[in-house]
Amino acid sequence: MEEKAMVNDILSSTKARLKDFQGAIIETENLELRQTLQNLRNSSESFQYELFKLAESKGYYTPSQNATPEEIGQVKNEVTNL
């Protein structure tokens, strides 16, 4: 398997794991377990960002174009009005 495919596979797996952590965190009543899951999630988020930066630097990933100020404002309004 080539490096690009491996990096993209790990990025996808990490994103899925982050979603799993989030689901477990919101369902957990035990504070110690909740904090452990939050710490694991935070570590996974840091790992994902480092791997993303590596993928971007090697040309394996091209992020989407930045949002315009108008688009950002629209999203802020929509979220505020929930």
Image (cartoon, grey):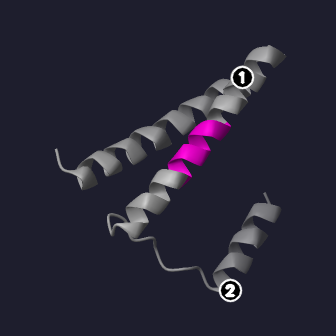
Whether residue 11 is situated above or below residue 66 in the rendered picture = above
Task: Classify residue 24 by image quadrant.
Answer: top right
Q: What residue is pinned by disc 2?
A: 70
- Asked if residue 62 lies left or right of residue 68, the reply is left
Q: Position of residue 34 (x, y in %)?
A: 75, 22
**Residue in front for this viewpoint, 76 or 42:** 42
Q: Nearer the viewer, mark 2 or mark 1?
A: 1
Task: Classify residue 28 by image quadrant.
Answer: top right
Q: Residue at x 62, y 38 (%)?
A: 43
Label 2 crowd bin: few (<14), some (14–19), many (20+), radius 10 Å: few
Locate the C terminus by quadrant.
bottom right
Magenta span has 46? yes
Whether residue 9 is situated above or below residue 82 in the rendered picture = above
What amino acid does circle 1 point to? Thr
Q: Residue at x 47, y 57 (%)?
A: 52
Whether residue 70 is situated above or below residue 54 in the rendered picture = below
**Residue in front for this viewpoint, 22 or 82:** 22
What's the magenta region?
42-49
Label 1 crowd bin: few (<14), some (14–19), many (20+), radius 10 Å: few
**Residue in front for this viewpoint, 17 or 29:** 17
**Residue in front for this viewpoint, 69 or 50:** 50
- Helix, strand or loop for the magenta stretch, by majority: helix
Q: Which of pointers 2 and 1 lies earlier in the amino acid sequence? A: 1
Q: Position of residue 35 (x, y in %)?
A: 77, 25
Magenta span has 71? no
Q: Residue at x 33, y 69 (%)?
A: 59
Q: What residue is pinned by disc 1?
A: 36
